[in-house]
Image: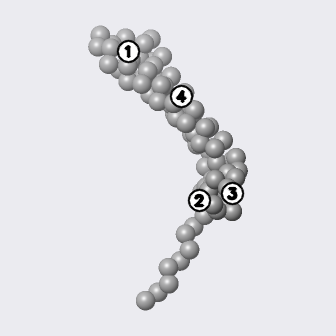
Amino acid sequence: MSERRPDPKPLRTRDTLTILVGTALWAIALVVVLLVVRPADPRPVWVCVAGIGLGVFGVLYIRRRDARLREPVPAAETGDPEPRR
């Protein structure tokens, strides 16, 4: 039987930038829907608004997660000498 290889290190990504680009694309889609398409049915407008709202939520979530990961956890709380990952 072969030995298990160690897990690879996590990739460093720019999550905030990715979410901001997606949110900007939803905002552009909203402008296009409102100015060009002018739908009789309001669903396309609400889809764009939901995309923008979820993007804002995503940015806030990722920033909060990153701030939590940067702060060290006291060893007394976790019992481990290693920082939280």
Q: Residue furthest bottom?
A: 1
Q: Is residue 28 left or right of residue 42?
A: right
Mark 3 and mark 1: span between their CA atoms? Answer: 58 Å
Which secondary structure, mark 2? loop
Which secondary structure, mark 4? helix
Mark 4 and mark 3: span between their CA atoms? Answer: 34 Å
Q: Is residue 76 left or right of residue 41?
A: right
Q: Earlier in the sequence, mark 4 or mark 2?
A: 2
Q: Earlier in the sequence, mark 3 or mark 1?
A: 1
Q: Image quarter for residue 49?
A: top left
Give, as a three-letter code, the residue at label 3.
Ala
| Mark 3–mark 1 CB contact (< 8 Å) | no
Q: Residues within 10 Å of mark 3 (few under 14, many from 20)?
A: few
Give, as a three-letter code, the residue at label 2.
Pro
On residue 37, which mark appears?
1
On residue 75, which mark appears?
3
**Residue assigned mark 4:** 56
Give, as a three-letter code, the residue at label 1.
Val
> Residue 76, how many percent across, how many down?
67, 56
Which secondary structure, mark 1? helix
**Residue assigned mark 2:** 10
| Mark 2–mark 3 CB contact (< 8 Å) | no
Q: Earlier in the sequence, mark 2 or mark 3?
A: 2
Which secondary structure, mark 3? helix
* Residue positioned 44% across, 11% down in the render: 35
* Residue positioned 69% across, 47% down in the render: 70
* Residue positioned 47% across, 86% down in the render: 2
